Amino acid sequence: MAVTPEQLAEKVLTIASLPTVYLKLMEITNNPNSTSADIVTLISGDIGFSVRLMKLVNSAFFGYPSKIDSLSRAVTVIGTKQLQELVLATSVVDMFKNVPTELINMELFWKHSIVCGVIARILANHRREFNAERAFISGLLHDIGRLVILMIIPNLTKKTLSIAKAQEHLLFQVETDVVGFTHAAVGGALLKQWQLPEQVIYATQYHHSPSVADKFKADVALIHIADIMANALHPSSSGESFVSPLNTAAWDELGLSVAILEPMLAEFTQQYQDTLSIIMPDVAP
């Protein structure tokens, strides 16, 4: 019997379960009687995350004009929903430590994911009506399904990588032939089980096929564009060896001018370096 994306996601949940601080933060956020003081108490109990959070809110990633010098101020400025997403962002790398490294370079994988997230956030800011932090999370997690496939069915993954390289085909297209579905479908299934926002789920599930998405088309288009830009701007290894073709309708969906590309590149370098230093502090840019 053929396995489904949902079954792969279920199998990996015991290996890559959401961090405790994230789950507790979800409980607090969903409790109408909770206060910002409850959140500060929770965050302050995790010294490592507290330090990373303070570095992040004072970095170019947020670009606040004045220094934020306390956790309570950071929570107030960021907001609970965005804080919840940032907790996940700073924890996600540690959640996938058991991926077979002989099949993929994990440092390069996460660099690609961070690049995609930073580009998505910058594009979202230029579009203005987007939630920029949600865009970052969507970009960071867009290839998460590839790690699930690597962990659960490594033999099929090896076959897929070999065929894609030998025939110079896009990896996600070969995945459909060999596995029966793409890493994007698996990623969408995992994020659904994690109960992330629908926009993040859709952006992950359809980032290679934006025209198929039946809603949240702008969110999907944003990650489709960011992923292509990430592969072109910062070649690395998310497992994919080639740059996917641009879906022009996705670019049109965003309603952005090509004139933003130059200022975007100027913003990118510092934001990427700051974000990488916080999420992967031991890794050089």
Image (cartoon, grey):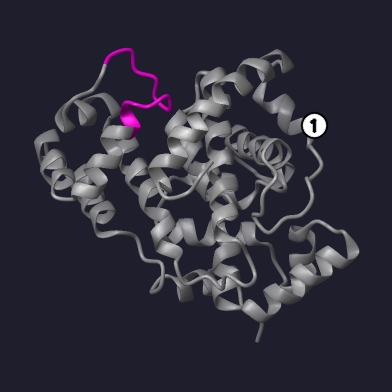
> Does the image show residue 256?
no
| Stretch of the chain drawn in magenta | 56-66
Q: Is residue 19 left or right of residue 231?
A: left
> Residue type at mark 1?
Thr
The picture places residue 162, in percent across and down from the top left corner, at 79, 71
212 above or below 20?
above
- Residue drawn where x is 55% and y is 60% of the image: 106
Residue sitting nearer the eye, 170 or 237: 237
- The N terminus lies in quadrant: bottom right
Main SS, magenta residues: loop
- What residue is disc 1 on? 248
Residue sitting nearer the eye, 283 or 234: 283
15 above or below 145?
below
- The C terminus lies in quadrant: top right
- Residue drawn where x is 78% and y is 37% of the image: 247
Q: Write down the quadrant of residue 167 in the picture.
A: bottom right
The picture places residue 51, in percent across and down from the top left corner, at 24, 40
215 above or below 11?
above
Q: Quick check: is 62 in the magenta stretch?
A: yes
38 above or below 263?
below
Residue sitting nearer the eye, 240 or 81: 240
